[in-house]
């Protein structure tokens, strides 16, 4: 999962990163010290699931930009970082899930990260969004049955077959989704746990009768992941 930090104070930025790494081991954290760097990263097709945004400079501009991002990426979770200031009353118009006060309290940072991760995993109506030169492509995760890695492309399959092929690694797809509903069962396949009908020895059968292989090295993990998913339903 990609997490971004816009923070003008280098010490605070790396304090945040250290705490995030402790809470969410699988995350990749990017730090910016200027809002233009954040905007360029978004333009370069980088997709972040959680953004920590400092309001020390240009707070209204940051909040307005946050609103636009949330319209584009419906799953994006915003966590503002600020000293107490009257601007705090304008913050919640962009619907952040948490606001952190400086100096940072590590316990509060952990609580904010855990809440964002929990919110990301709560809705089955989340969307997969990719931005490339051809435009913006969005599809609800619930409509994706599985994905297949084919050389440099990722083939996305739904109930009735192939939906779209995009330039993306299967590992990057799983970072977007953070493994809440998708599990990699084979080096070339990741399956949507919502659409599994049954698991047999080294094979998955989906609701639409599609069959996916399970590699021997991933069999135990795949079966355990599916059982855990059913327990949480």
Image (cartoon, rainbow, N blue to C red):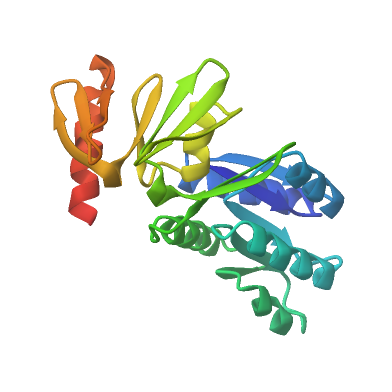
Q: Residue at x 66, y 73 (%)?
A: 94
- Look at 79% across and 54% down and name the residue there: 9
Q: How many marks?
A: 0
Residue 188, position as x, y percentages in the image: 41, 20
- Quarter of the image for residue 134 reads top right
Which residue is outermost to the front?
160
Q: Name the residue at 57% across, 69% down.
A: 98
Q: Position of residue 159 (x, y in %)?
A: 34, 41
Q: Is residue 196 left or right of residue 62?
A: left
Q: Residue at x 62, y 41 (%)?
A: 29
Q: Would residue 26 be visible to someone looking at this image?
A: no
Q: Nearer the viewer, residue 139 or 83?
A: 139
Location of residue 101 in the rendering, given as x and y in whole percent from the top left corner:
65, 70
**Image-based side of 34 in relation to 54, left or right:** right
Does residue 176 sit above or below 60 in this rendering?
above
- Where in the figure is residue 193, as x and y percent of width and height? 29, 42
Residue 217 higher or lower than 14, as above or below: above
Q: Quarter of the image holding residue 197?
A: top left
The foreground one among 17 and 215 is 215
Q: Is residue 41 left or right of residue 20?
A: right
Quadrant of the image containing the C terminus: bottom left
From the viewer's perspective, is residue 138 above or below residue 205? below
Does residue 226 appear anywhere in the picture?
Answer: yes
């Amino acid at each position: 999962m990609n997490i971004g930090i816009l923070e003008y104070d280098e010490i605070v930025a790396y304090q945040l990163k250290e705490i995030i790494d402790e809470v969410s081991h699988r995350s990749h954290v990017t730090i910016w010290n200027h809002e233009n760097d954040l905007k360029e990263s978004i333009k370069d097709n980088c997709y972040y699931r959680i953004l920590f945004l400092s309001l020390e400079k240009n707070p209204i501009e940051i909040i307005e930009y946050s609103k636009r991002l949330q319209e584009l990426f419906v799953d994006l979770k915003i966590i503002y970082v600020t000293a107490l200031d009257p601007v705090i009353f304008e913050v919640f118009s962009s619907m952040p899930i948490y606001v952190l006060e400086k100096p940072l309290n590590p316990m509060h940072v952990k609580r904010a990260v855990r809440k964002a991760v929990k919110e990301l995993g709560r809705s089955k109506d989340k969307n997969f969004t990719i931005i490339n030169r051809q435009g913006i492509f969005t599809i609800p995760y619930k409509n994706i049955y599985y994905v297949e890695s084919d050389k440099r492309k990722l083939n996305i399959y739904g109930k009735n077959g192939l939906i779209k092929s995009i330039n993306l690694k299967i590992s990057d797809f799983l970072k977007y989704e953070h493994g809440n509903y998708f599990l990699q069962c084979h080096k070339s396949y990741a399956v949507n746990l919502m659409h599994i009908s049954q698991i047999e020895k080294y094979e998955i059968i989906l609701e639409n009768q599609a069959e996916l292989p399970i590699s021997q090295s991933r069999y135990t993990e795949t079966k355990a992941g599916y059982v855990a998913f059913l327990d949480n339903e």
